[in-house]
Image (cartoon, rainbow, N blue to C red):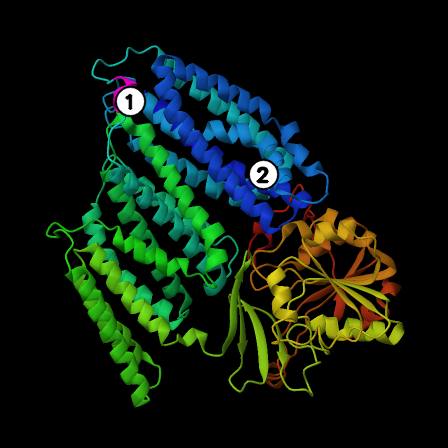
Amino acid sequence: MRPLFTLTIFASSALLFVIQPIVGRMMLPAFGGAPAVWTTSLLFFQVLLLAGYAYAHFSLRRFGPRVQPWLHVGLFAGGVLACAPLTVRLIGGAERGEVSVLSVLATLGLAAGPLFFVLAAGSPLLQRWFALTGDRDGGDPYFLYASSNLGSLLGLLAYPFVVEPRLTLAEQANLVTFGAAAVGVLMALCGLAVARRPIPTEEPPPASTESGSARERLLWVALAAVPSSLLMSVTTYFTTDLTPVPLLWVVPLALYLLTFVAAFARRTLVGPVAVARAVPFLVVALGGVLLTGTTKPLFAVAALHLAVFTGLALALHLRLASLRPPSGRLTEFYLWLSFGGMLGGAFNALVAPLVFPTVLEYPIGLGLACLLLAPGPRSGPADRWDALVPLGIAVATAALLFAFQVSGVESGPLRTALGLGIPGALALLALARPPRLALSLAAVYSVTVSFGLPSDWGLLEVGRSFFGVHRVKRNDDGTMHSLLHGDTMHGRQWTDEARRRTPLAYYHPTGPIGQVFERLAETGPPREVGLVGLGVGSLVAYGRPGQRLTVYEIDPYVVTLARDRGWFSFLRDARCPVEIVIGDARLTLARSPRRFGLLVLDAFTSDSIPVHLLTREAFELYRSRLEPGGILAVHVSNRFLELRPVVASITASLGLRAWVNRDVGLSPGDLLDGKTASVWVIVTEREEDTRGLATAPGWEPLLPEPGRRPWTDDYAPVLTAIRGSL
């Protein structure tokens, strides 16, 4: 009996984790990457997961173990039929009108709603069914939750590394359908095993299974919500402030799932108190790293972040597992857990970007996690010292930092060790009292932030949008302003009158895109120029009287920084009319009647490239928006993705010609002058359309690699573009 239930719950959870990225990829071409699309999708799946757990809980109470299994098997069959491949593929043909919340919800509901709902209910239902089979392990079926999370981990890893590189979206839809049918058969066998077994005499009637206090349920919710929030916080920090490596988000999520596996396994190697005593030492070390803005050495810093996250998540999940109720209340337990997980995710995805200018939810999550650690055996009830001790530590921290400032001690290892190490060590004295520990660490963090962090030196403005945290900084002598998204630079500008109209960074006049604008100016500048991606507005400086520039930018906050704050003046100094269109470039270009003599794509420099802008169908759209003889210029500079072969295979499949310039040979003086090496590709119908650039120094033909498939809306595996991948 146990192998059947273990296999079923494993397969069901794996399929659940595969469905979400498939649906997301299918929606991209039709709906784009606007914030409303992704926040709506997140809420949809979170609410549907909670609804599945609620259905599992209340349907068992209402119908009992005799009828409910057959009800669920029937619903499961309906969910499979409702989400057959033909229905799922309708997403690719969604009408490209104005994207609305209702249209996103309708598409999600049609594509994945019924199947996701019945799969979401599978984990708690199967565990409860197993408890009723009479198996010798049925009295404590929570070990099956470990199998559920192992299945989720398999689905998580299988999609980017196995499924996406080998299957088109249509084939992936078939995989989901056949996989769901197989899970349905397994589910039916499990339901049959339950329905044919006599109900144990000691099993209390459903009406009597509701017990427990509000405090108990609140603790369940908190212990589930905080690790969920921390997962999103550390992922955001990794992919913005630390290093934007593609697919890096997989690592924290895999560790998160493994902590559930370890916590709910039949035999645990360590208890919640033991982990709770060890992990605060790492938290204090991480606090020093965060407060000093340390990012090097990269491997050691990343390992510390992951160790703290894993330790805290494991400690809280171990405590959660130790508080699990008898099997009669199993579905209620999981209902509150899913509610907590939804709260944690919604806080990070929806609330934090609106409330906090930076990823402040990360240190908040660390503090709340310390607050929820299992108390030590000698800890008694809270007393007045729980508030006075953190207050004393705050005063000590402030006194140390103030003394350093007055004495003129410069920032360095000694100042960091004394200013943060001593207060941190004092905070660790409260290991056995989680409230006092959390308050002490919060005091150190708050006081230190008030004195100014090294990472904020030269900071002019910091703000946050759906797409991440943006910082405007000046260099040491104040002669240059730069716009940064994490550690990715999106443009810079001189501040003095003599040089401020000269584009810098990837856009400097002697670089590839500078050569394109110069050659067009010499041979007849086009009247209409389209720019996908604004940055600080560097390319606007190339506009000439008589031209009209149209800029397509998805992030309104980037427009605010480039135009309204006074840090950058490219838009203000423009020599021709500039229209800014807010929205996803593919959707707005499709609705635009304009044709361009030059269309510049500058949206691929970060790791999270908008894949739907780099497919064969997207390039067909770009070609349709070019005037006869027009040029498409694509910025493919990227630290982690090799995009030249991607563009080469697409252009070759469309019968277009392409040339690449790698901007080599920048001198140290060029770098001091604000120039940055870049890689650009120009695409035309014919060689003569390049106005001589095809034979100019630095430009060479971009030829497709034999056997490489062009990316399409149906097939675009990012893994194949990672540098060094096979």
Q: Disc 1 on helix, strand or loop?
A: helix
Q: Which residue is mark 2?
A: 23
Q: Which residue is mark 1?
A: 131
Q: Is residue 224 left or right of residue 180?
A: left
| Residue at the image position 31 percent from the left and 79 percent from the top | 413
| Residue at the image position 28 percent from the left and 69 percent from the top | 444
Disc nearer the start of the sequence (1/2)? 2
Question: In the displayed structure, would residue 478 be above or below residue 238?
Answer: below
**Category of crowding for the residue at label 1, using alpha-carbon neighbours closer than 10 angstroms: few (below 14), some (14–19), many (at least 20):** many
The residue closer to the viewer here, 574 or 296, is: 574
Measuring from the top left, give residue 59's x and y in whole percent: 40, 21
Q: Quadrant of residue 470?
A: bottom right
Can you say which quadrant of the picture contains the N terminus?
top left
Q: What range is drawn magenta here?
A: 205-209
Q: Is residue 313 visible?
A: yes
Q: Is residue 333 left or right of residue 662?
A: left
Amino acid on which disc 1 is placed? Ala
Measuring from the top left, give residue 237's x and y in whole percent: 44, 60
